[in-house]
Image (cartoon, rainbow, N blue to C red):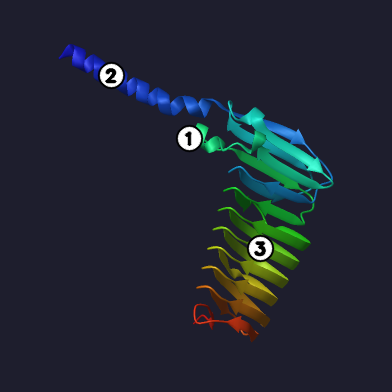
């Protein structure tokens, strides 16, 4: 009985250590960057974007991962990826790589390879191009004049805020949720089993095909450029 008790105690202690040690092995590294307006992230890395008066990047990851995160700035485009584009999630399960970016100006976001992008405050800019592919998720708050958005390959994009003009396309089983993004004028297309939900007040040009739907709110005049039996453009009640 005593040996059984000792075994259970040892097992519980090992279990506690198993869960506690990974937290202590998290490290952070700050990188000084300047003069960038666009960010591209891949390799399943989670990106958190803030707009402010400074420009910097902070990486938070397990000590075995952090030095293999590659950050490059070429012509104003910051690229964030894992070394050699290796699928690190297969090697380090239950671990995450988080990158926190602070920028003065932001004109473009590219997410691929299962990466997720979140805004930590409201992004304010004249022009913003968003591309999400390969099962990536993008969730942003924004105030923009002109928005270009492409979501493909099973990616999901959720937007809040305001935009004057928006051009958006969803394909390959992707979703766009922009019901909380108040838009004046929009051109929206959905194909390949995708859904796009938008909120437009003045003018909407929409097309849907291949089992896709474009759903809209607002009092916009609507021009259905194309639709099929397997696609629908409809107003939400």
Residue 126's tag is: none
How would you rate the neighbour count of disc 1 (Cα within 10 Å): few for under 14, some for 14-19, many for 20 or more? few
Confirm or deny contact between disc 1 and disc 3 (CB under 8 A).
no
Which callout, 1 or 3, points at the residue further toward the start of the chain? 1
Q: CA distance from mark 2 to mark 1?
A: 26 Å
Depth order, front residue of 97/57: 97
What SS does tag 2 mark? helix
In the displayed structure, 139 sits above or below 11; it is below
Q: Quadrant of the N terminus?
A: top left
Which callout, 2 or 3, points at the residue further toward the start of the chain? 2
Confirm or deny contact between disc 2 and disc 3 (CB under 8 A).
no
Quickly name the residue at label 3: 150
Quickly name the residue at label 2: 9
How would you rate the neighbour count of disc 2 (Cα within 10 Å): few for under 14, some for 14-19, many for 20 or more? few
Toward the top, the furthest residue is 3
Horizontally, residue 101 falls left or right of residue 86, namely right
Which callout, 2 or 1, points at the residue further toward the start of the chain? 2
Confirm or deny contact between disc 2 and disc 1 (CB under 8 A).
no
Q: Quadrant of residue 159?
A: bottom right
Inspect this view and state whether residue 26 appears.
Answer: yes
What SS does tag 3 mark? strand
């Amino acid at each position: 009985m005593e040996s059984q008790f000792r075994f259970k105690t040892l097992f519980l202690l090992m279990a506690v250590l198993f869960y506690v040690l990974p937290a202590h092995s998290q490290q952070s590294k700050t990188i000084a960057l300047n003069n960038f307006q666009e960010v591209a992230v891949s390799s399943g890395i989670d990106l958190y974007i803030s707009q402010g008066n400074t420009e910097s990047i902070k990486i938070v990851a397990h000590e075995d991962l952090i030095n293999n995160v590659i950050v490059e700035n070429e012509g104003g485009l910051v690229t964030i990826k894992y070394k050699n584009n290796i699928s690190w999630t297969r090697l380090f399960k239950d671990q995450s790589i988080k990158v926190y970016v602070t920028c003065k100006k932001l004109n473009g976001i590219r997410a691929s390879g299962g990466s997720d992008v979140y805004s930590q405050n409201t992004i304010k800019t004249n022009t913003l191009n968003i591309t999400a592919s390969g099962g990536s998720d993008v969730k942003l708050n924004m105030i923009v004049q002109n928005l270009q958005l492409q979501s493909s390959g099973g990616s999901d994009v959720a937007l809040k805020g305001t935009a004057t003009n928006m051009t958006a396309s969803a394909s390959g089983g992707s979703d766009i949720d922009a019901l909380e993004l108040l838009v004046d004028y929009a051109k929206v297309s959905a194909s390949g089993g995708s859904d796009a939900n938008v909120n437009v007040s003045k003018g909407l040009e929409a097309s849907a095909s291949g089992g896709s739907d474009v759903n809209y709110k607002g009092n916009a005049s609507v021009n259905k450029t194309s639709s099929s039996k397997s696609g629908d453009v409809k107003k939400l009640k």
